[in-house]
Amino acid sequence: MNKVSGIRDQIIQELPLWDQPSISVGIVKDGKVVLAEGFGYADVEKNEKANQETMYQIGSCSKAFTAAAVALLVDQGKLQWDRPVQDYMPWLEFKDPFTTAHVTVRDLLCHRTGLPRHDAYWINGPWTRREMAENLRNMEPAWSFRSHWCYQNTCYVAAGMLIEEVSGMSWEDFVRVNLLEPLEMTRTTFYVDAIRGDENHAEPYSRLLPTDMKGYEKISFLKSDREDIEKGVGAPYGPAGSIMSTVTDMCKWVLFNLQEGKVGDRQLISEENMKELHKPQMLLSEPLLVPFPEQDFYSYGLGWFIETYRGHKMVEHGGNIDGFSALVTMLPDMDLGVVCLTNFNNSFNTYASTYEILDAYLGESNGEWHQRWRKIIGDMFAANPENMKAMNGEAVPGTTPSHPLKDFVGTYHNACYGDIVISEHEDGLHFLYNKEESPLAHFHYDTFQIHNPKALFADMNLRFNTDRKGAVDGIEFGITLDPAAKDEYFVRKREA
């Protein structure tokens, strides 16, 4: 059977088993695109099928474009990988003065600043791009500088700001002029209004509940209030994850990377700096997702994860943003690249399909990746109640709050995360953060639980504290979403 034909048949067979709307797949082998095709539906309600030109959001696969843009500026002599960022942006500060003085662009791009993710503040938040980068000064580190790898989106926003300051162009314009146009990636953009206005775009979908294995619904695109296509203002988090593209365009991106920075006969980025992007810069203590016996040597380059797959060096990066998942993968020694784009939230069909394609070219047939990934997800969802119980602890029965509910009502502020608003309704207290409102259920004493299965903080506990006089004056909350990080403290705002 023809290899590509067999791959297509498997993708078609597995898509209904994932119960997801679509997946678009591209394969590059030996300098040629051997498959670029959409499967399933870009818009289920309108019965519109996906194809090779259907536009998807690619999420954090955008990080590789930011790193490549930095490499271009290094080639031009305008940046140095290992020069302190403060030499270029004196205003950029971290909470730790040593990190402020020594952090380099390489550190920003390989996630080794000592910060945990600190993501929740920017999702539907009011921040500008500059304010996001400035917010690094308010973020509590969880580890010492360069001692631990942890994925950190805001550091990529800071790298985007560095590109802007050094080039005099917006991050969007610099990437478009210096990367997208030379690569002829004509259906790649940065703006939500652009994808929504395109005749051939995928709509975003998600499960009805986060732990469901079947069923889905259309959801809204994630769009920042700050984004304005008419003014050329992109999403504040753009350098970390705002690009939208097609499988055809992303195959061009893969070819460019496999050809070590060449577009035709033109060396767009030097081979030396392409190697910097694709080589290990920081070791991971464990894989970002789950360990497999077929994979080893987990590390991060600059905008790419670097590991081994069945003994071959693998360069890859995934992306997730509301209603979309993406994965770009390369085995350089095989001159092989794979792109998988989906219009489904937190889809792992991208990984299963990619690994099956890699196996097809490696002559392996025992991966059973679709079944393995679906079992992993099912087991993960089944374990969720026990995991939340371990995080929250056992509720002490028979307790009541120390104050009437009205005494908890107010606005609570944290320098990094902004405001939590607590209000009282007929059904009890409600929690509002960055436009997302959820009822609170009493857990025990002055601890309440977020009672909204679709919320970012579903089933998480927050604790109200009192001052020496007994007045409610603060909230402790694990908003960092990282067990290695301390809970953040929100101080109650007092009326003047």
Image (cartoon, rainbow, N blue to C red):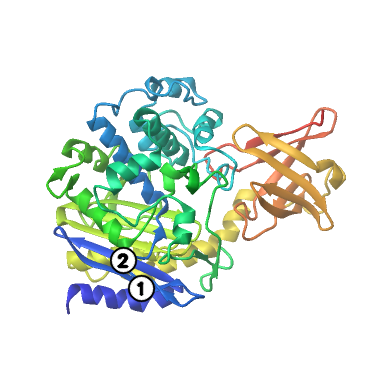
Q: Earlier in the sequence, mark 2 or mark 1?
A: 2
Question: Residue 382, image x and y in percent?
Answer: 54, 65
Q: Residue at x 34, y 67 (%)?
A: 24
Nearer to the camera, 296 or 208: 208
Question: Residue 36, image x and y in percent?
Answer: 27, 67
* Left or right relative to 27: residue 245: right
Toward the right, the furthest residue is 404
Residue at the spot of label 1? 39
Q: Residue at x 21, y 50 (%)?
A: 256
* Label 2 SS: strand
Question: Residue 64, image x and y in percent?
Answer: 33, 45
Q: Are marks 2 and 1 in contact (CB under 8 Å)?
A: yes
Tell me the amino acid under the disc marked 1.
Phe
Query: Dividing the image into 4 quarters, which one contains the N terminus?
Result: bottom left
Question: Residue 4, image x and y in percent?
Answer: 21, 72
Count numbered badges in the picture: 2
* Left or right relative to 321: residue 388: right
Q: Is residue 235 visible?
A: no
- How far apart in space, not on screen, are marks 2 and 1 (Cα)? 8 Å
Q: Is residue 409 above or below residue 25?
A: above
Residue at the spot of label 2? 25
Query: Dividing the image into 4 quarters, which one contains the C terminus?
Result: top right
Q: Which mark is residue 278?
A: none
